Amino acid sequence: METQKIGGKTQLYGIFAHPIKHSLSPFLHNQSFLDNDIDARYLAFDVEPNEFDAAMKSIQALNIGGLNLSMPYKEKALSYMDELSPEAEFIGAINTILNRDDVLIGYNTDGIGFVRSLEAENIQLANQRVVLLGAGGASKAVAYQLCQNHVKEIIIFKRKNRTFQEVCNYFKGMSEKCHIPIRVFPYEDHLNLNHKIKNSDIIVNCTNIGMGHLEEAMPINDLSILEKNQVVVDLIYQPQETLFLKGAKKRGCHTINGLGMLLYQAAEAFNIWTGSDMSISNIEETVKRKLYKEGSTS
Ligand code: NAP
């Protein structure tokens, strides 16, 4: 990669995560600084949990312009913020910090990244019926943004474990605030799951099923319920095509993996920091090569 010279005024940006491994974010942001002729650098910081407090306090001390946060710090960082954007406040987790003259503002760009990635594939959201499988941090961010995009309804499936009622209450609050019907059902009720999926326009896997040790598993049992007019999205981008997406593609569905969400959430953070655009079309091919041939992560 071509680089600009580092000088006395070069602005620092970065990501705090643990573990960080082969993060793709430095490439995305450094290439975009270069493309936009911005005197800045982005570094990946593997912050140990016992050093998180010191790392957060260093943002103002070192005049870091902005940060991304990944696992396990998206919720822990909230208490360090002076201000929160509306979506961050609602979701209760941040993945982006802007340091504006020592005022720290927290944002969550995952939901907007998701929606932009669907818009890039010409998917209409207004008035659509959406099923979300899973109800964790990503699902909350996606649901919030889907509401902002005026979907008709959101149906969420979540395991009936000790967090079920809490999650029901959370989404009831979101539904009331956003004036969009949101209902949560037990994941274990396969009959209902199949029925709701059949009657939906867009199905999104927001669980970890399909990656890591669950790479051979699928978030639904019966793929024959999928129809070719449906859009099936998997937030997973590693592997590039999960078994779920492969099966949905065979049924003729329009399938989309999580890479677009990854790129557009980064683009949104870049825009918050710099006011400039990340040129996704320019970097997408390099990103695919790094992810699928060289084994980088987010
Ligand atoms: P999370 O907060 O841990 O939530 C995971 C959700 O999946 C939970 O609702 C959990 O159920 C459910 N789940 C996990 N294993 C399950 C199983 N065996 N059966 C049924 N449900 C199961 O994780 P997250 O941050 O939301 O991430 C979820 C997925 O989105 C991951 O695959 C992640 O890689 C992906 N993601 C992608 C992007 C992107 O940019 N493309 C960004 C963020 C996340 P319980 O609630 O019952 O525990």
Image (tube, rainbow, N blue to C red):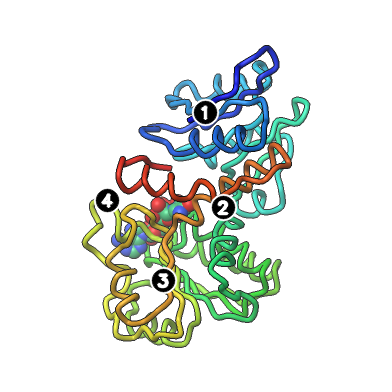
- In the image, what residue type sits under mark 2? Tyr
Residue bearing mark 2: 264
Sooner in the amino-acid sequence: mark 3 or mark 4: 4
Q: Report the side of 135 relative to 29 (left or right).
A: left
Sooner in the amino-acid sequence: mark 2 or mark 1: 1
Task: For marks 3 and 1, give the one nearer the viewer.
Answer: 1
Residue bearing mark 3: 255
Residue at mark 4: C-beta within 8 A of ligand 1? no
Residue bearing mark 4: 212
- Would you call the spot at circle 2 few (<14 residues within 10 Å), some (14-19), or many (20 or more)? many
Tell me what residue is drawn at x 43 percent, y 26 percent.
Answer: 46
Task: Say above or below: 105 vs 152.
Answer: above
> How far apart in space, not on screen, are marks 3 and 1 (Cα)?
35 Å
Identify the secondary structure beneath mark 4: helix
Sooner in the amino-acid sequence: mark 3 or mark 2: 3
Tell me what residue is drawn at x 67 percent, y 49 percent.
Answer: 89
Identify the secondary structure beneath mark 2: helix
Q: Report the side of 247 relative to 113 (left or right).
A: left
- Would you call the spot at circle 3 few (<14 residues within 10 Å), some (14-19), or many (20 or more)? many
Position in image of residue 168 (x %, y %): 52, 67
Q: Quadrant of residue 106?
A: top right
Residue bearing mark 1: 2
> How far apart in space, not on screen, are marks 2 and 4 (Cα)?
23 Å
- In the image, what residue type sits under mark 3? Thr
Identify the secondary structure beneath mark 3: strand
